[in-house]
Amino acid sequence: MIKALIFDLDGVIVDTAKYHYLAWKELADSLGFEFTKQHNERLKGVSRVKSLEILLEIGNLSFSEEKKHEFAVNKNKKYLEYVTKMDSSEILSGVINFIEDAKANNIKIALGSASKNAMTILKQIDILKYFDAVIDGTSVSKAKPDPEVFLKGAEALGMKPSECIVFEDAQAGVEAAINGGFYCVGIGGEEELGEANYLMSGFENINYKKIIEIIL
């Protein structure tokens, strides 16, 4: 029986990937190499530290740990400049109706995100009130595809993984959900998210009961 839903943040509830891209691109530009939107796909669902490693690999560059820390901090400052200007208009279509419907039927809601800025974003777009638990990058030590973030989310809700559905838009996130024993709905295409139990393009014209019927 499904008793809880666990949502990733970026690309599922809001599209902050564009702001990550702009911030990473600015760093790449300053280091003298091109960073494309296609490159940025490799960073989806990946921690900030790992994202920086991928970016430097793309640029074929190597730096000291101290310098890499400086890059990561500066990138995050630039990213925060963007997200602190966000508002509720940036919530993806259908998400709020979906969550409200689930909560009206006593379904618990958690966030499971690699982002260390998740709380800032949830407050900025005024949806923190919907979440019974928030597990983000400040709460975990292992990056997706390790299932730690989702396992902690389920634990915070008092649920077993088999009682939860995870909503993810990144391959690493889908793998994390499957690795943890969760049901998983992928938001996106089959090529990247084929391991998910069900795929959909977004939350419009669907409710949680329909998802459960399809998955179970």
Image (cartoon, helix red, strand yellow):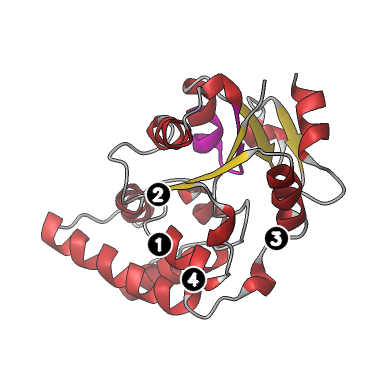
Q: Quadrant of the C terminus?
A: top right
CA gap, disc 3 to disc 2?
20 Å
Which amino acid type corresponds to the residue marked 1 in the rendered image? Asn
Q: Which residue is mark 2?
A: 136
User: What is the distance, in whole Å, between disc 3 and disc 1 at their CAs?
Assistant: 18 Å
- Point out the tag, 3 or 1, that comes first from the N-terminus: 3
Q: Is residue 59 magenta?
A: no
Mark 1 or mark 4, earlier in chain: 4
The question of residue 173 being in magenta is answered with yes
Res. 22 mark: 4
Point out residue 10 in the picture as x, y percentages from the top left corner. Answer: 55, 55
For mark 4, does the 10 Å Cα neighbourhood hold few (<14), some (14 to 19), or many (20 or more) residues?
Answer: some
**Rendered residue at 44%/69% (across/down):** 25
Q: Nearer the viewer, mark 1 or mark 4?
A: 1
* Number of numbered markers: 4
Distance from the alpha carbon under mark 2 to that under mark 1:
8 Å
Question: What span is in magenta?
Answer: 164-175
Mark 2 touches mark 1? (CB < 8 Å): yes
Which residue position holds label 3? 92
Quadrant position of residue 27: bottom left
Q: Position of residue 74 (x, y in %)?
A: 28, 72
Of the two numbered discs 2 and 1 on the same chain, state the one appearing first in sequence: 1
Q: Which residue is mark 1?
A: 117
| Real-space CA distance between mark 1 and mark 4, rounded to the nearest whole angstrom | 16 Å
Is 144 placed above or below 25 here?
A: above
Answer with mark 3 or mark 2, whichever residue precedes in sequence.
3
Amino acid, disc 4:
Leu
158 vs 194, left or right, is: left
Q: Residues within 10 Å of mark 1 (few under 14, many from 20)?
A: some
Do the residues bearing badges 2 and 4 touch, measured as CB atoms within 8 Å?
no
